[in-house]
Amino acid sequence: MSDLGRDVASRTDAQVIGSSPVERTAAGQALAPEQELMTINMGPHHPATHGVLRLLVSLEGEVVRDLKPVVGYVHTGIEKNCEDKSYWKVIPFVERMDYLSYFFNMEAFVGCVERLLELEIPPRANYLRVIHLELNRIHSHLVWLGTGALDLGAMSMFFYCFRDRDRILDLFELSTGQRMHTRYFQVGGVFEDIPVGFERQARAFCAEMPSRIDQYEAILNRNEIFLRRTRNVGIVPRQRLLDLGVTGPLLRAAGEPWDLRKVDPTLAYADFDFQIPVGTVGDGHDRYRVRVREMRESVRIIEQALDGLPEGPWIADDRKVVLPPRDELSTSMEALIHHFKLVTEGFRVPPGEAYHAVEGPRGELGCFVLADGSAKPARVHVRDPSFVNLQALRDMCVGGYVADLIQNLAMLDPILGGIDR
Amino acid sequence: MEVRREKLRALSPLEEPRSPAELRVRQLRARDLLRGDLEGADLERHVSESVLTTTLDRATRWGRANSIFPATFGLACCAIEMMSMVSPRYDIARFGAENLRATPRQADMLILSGRVAIKMAPVIRRLYDQMLEPKWVVSMGACSSSGGMFANYAVVQGADKFMPVDIHIPGCPPRPEALLYGFNKLQRMIVGNPDAGWRRRYNAIGTEEWARPVTGTASREEAEAYAAAREQSVARHAELAGESG
Amino acid sequence: MPDAPGLELIAQDLNDAAAGSVLGTYHEHGQGCLIVDPERILAVLGWLRDTPGQEYRFLASLHGVDYLPAQPRFGVVYELLNMPRVERLRVRAALADSGPDELPEIDSCVPLFPAAEFQEREVYDFFGIVFSGHPDLRRILMPEDYVGWPQRRDFPVGGEPVIFTRDERDVPRWFE
């Protein structure tokens, strides 16, 4: 034992630390032993369940000095594929970008095409879209909370959040037939009306959800470990976030009350009474509180939407764009022709370009569509919030510890499907 | 009597008798068994040989199937459904796969959940190579089974193209029940005959990292075919190594 | 969104400030777009960002568009946002194709809008448009050694043909 101790002590610090790769300064000189930087690779596969994000982290001891994210490990070429498909076939492709907020992806694209077509959607479709979007927002925040708390060590939160998430997916399955990637929003409205039991089940969900959120807050809000890990960690000044293009709960936690649902309401958001939670400090704790509070506000929006759900058609009746109802196909010749044209070729959109943005769970989700007059879009680009928010990760982590990096990543809520598209 | 006859049949094609004398002993023992005359030390020895060789193996396979350690490997949307399979409603822990290990060195099943981009393919292959045998791969969802809806430059059209896959589960994303069904199928496959499947298909017999004879209900012909395939595969791999090395 | 006359006023003021920068405007579907000479893009964006009364300080999105067969072929589109007035403005830098051997170039706006860093890398990755002055211009979503600019219109979509039973006869040994 004493031999071992002597042996270790006789080596220099550099030798002990320097068994790992050393990064040299730009001047080509080696750093002093206490300044050596070690670059580690938090590879695309890692225990943090946030997708295939690769981080090249330069550490001095345990302090992060530099951070380079490497993305592209789930790049699917969706935007290129969309140029080959007719407009309604693009909807399932665009859905799968940010794979936790699939309704928002659909809304961004479909809203953009409706803007190009100057198509009004009926009020019932408006409200149905809002209901599904807010349910998707709660769903996305629940997954974030479950996986984020899992990263910080609170394993039980994962199970609780996924239990509630399954109830939301039951609602989606009831109305659309699929749990995820539902292809529910169509150009002109929604694909189908909600079935009879949906409203009752949704109201039951809304009645129970606030107490569930209370339970989650009871676990985490005053938990010493959670507070110590998230308070005053990962603070980026508000102006810097604005410069970096960050939107969503990250920006709101830093104190900027910017939410597209309030400032630029599309759909029926102007009809509802809800609040935007805004933080003060902009640390991890504020981000957590903002998102949890957003879940509560989303429940309120859903309740108001269910109360005020208007009767009427659920999709526009412009037959050049929207499929006719099936019972007409056997009696009306025009309906048959419209159906045939729409299914084989698709509807044509007059040439033009438009950009439509919605407030997704992670920030501003925008879709740019360039139409060239044919039945296929010439360019579909989705401005994904996680892609732009990722630029803030470096500012959040530099100067903090590696453990704080994990926490920052959890609170950043990146979805690699959206980043890589 | 039937039980003993089965055990005898299981014993015979495995090890060739090393000498004519041993063959004679085996024949006599077989005759005594059939007559019901085997007793004493002979009986005990016979039972221990046959029971251990077959039942232990079956027990091992049963143990392997019911305590799979999946690797937490989520790529895209299917990862969310895989996480929900771990969640309380579609519990995978009741099938024994509770312990999801993040490191491939401690995992024995890789669930490819999500689309395989061309940038990610070498990473997945490296992870697969880091896993210890026996290992199985479940390709969850349409994208990793066949490229899914993404027939383009950026997605590998099926993880089959660069790594062996045991179970393909269709769906986009597959429901957690579908994933559990595929998982149960994999368990039955492991219990039944872990040799069946990709090693034969990919002409890779002989690349196992553990030494194990063919056991179970293999017939003599199968055992010979296996031995021949093994030799051929080993020769081919040596040839490939000779070419590249 | 500034309405059509407002857009014309902006274009006029911009042409006064930086002569010859605005090549055209159009206003449709409630959104206005300035078509700008790519050589002057920094002057245009700086004017839009800093002039009191304009102050489009938020870059919502930066993306590339390939207008083939229309010319000029490429467009780098900047979606600008004025947060206090909630007004969006689109600026399109119309870049011509430099031919098969050269890559089109434009100035990088990262000094003005740090939000552009990843998004310019993405435009470079997919269209081959070089942003001079970018701190770290390399591929972001494709593998580093990839050859080709995938999102250009003349780049093939790729993938493999789906083999149905009737195609099996035509593709020998498809199972390998």
Image (cartoon, coloured by chain):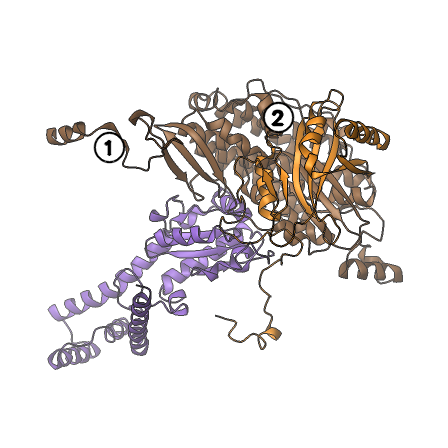
Q: Return the chain for callout 2.
A: A
Which quadrant: the N terminus of chain A?
top left
**Chain letter for the orange part:** C
Dot label at residue A242: 2
The residue lying at 58 percent from left, 77 percent from top is C169
Q: Which of the 4 quarters of the picture holds residue B171?
A: bottom right
The residue lying at 79 percent from left, 41 percent from top is A115
Callout 1, which amino acid? Gln
For this orientation, the residue located farthest to the front is: C19
The residue lying at 53 percent from left, 31 percent from top is A412
Q: Which of the 4 quarters of the picture holds residue A253?
A: top right
Q: Is residue A384 above or below residue B40?
A: above
Q: Could you tell whether B229 is left or right of A1 in the image?
A: right
Q: At which x and y percent is residue B11?
A: 23, 72
The answer, for residue A195, to whether it is visible in the render is no
Q: At which x and y percent is residue C33?
A: 77, 37
**Dot 2 alpha-carbon crowd within 10 angstroms: few under 14, some 14 to 19, many 20 or more:** some
Q: At which x and y percent is residue B95?
A: 42, 50
Q: What tint does the image give chain A?
A: brown
Front-lying residue, A354 or C39:
C39
Q: CA distance from mark 2 to mark 1?
A: 44 Å
The residue lying at 26 percent from left, 64 percent from top is B212
Q: What tint does the image give chain B?
A: purple
Q: Could you tell whether B193 is left or right of A104 in the image?
A: left
Dot label at residue A15: 1
Front-lying residue, A87 or B83:
A87
Q: At which x and y percent is residue A280?
A: 58, 17
Determine whether label 2 and label 1 are within 8 Å by CB. no
Dot label at residue A39: none
**Dot 1 alpha-carbon crowd within 10 angstroms: few under 14, some 14 to 19, many 20 or more:** few
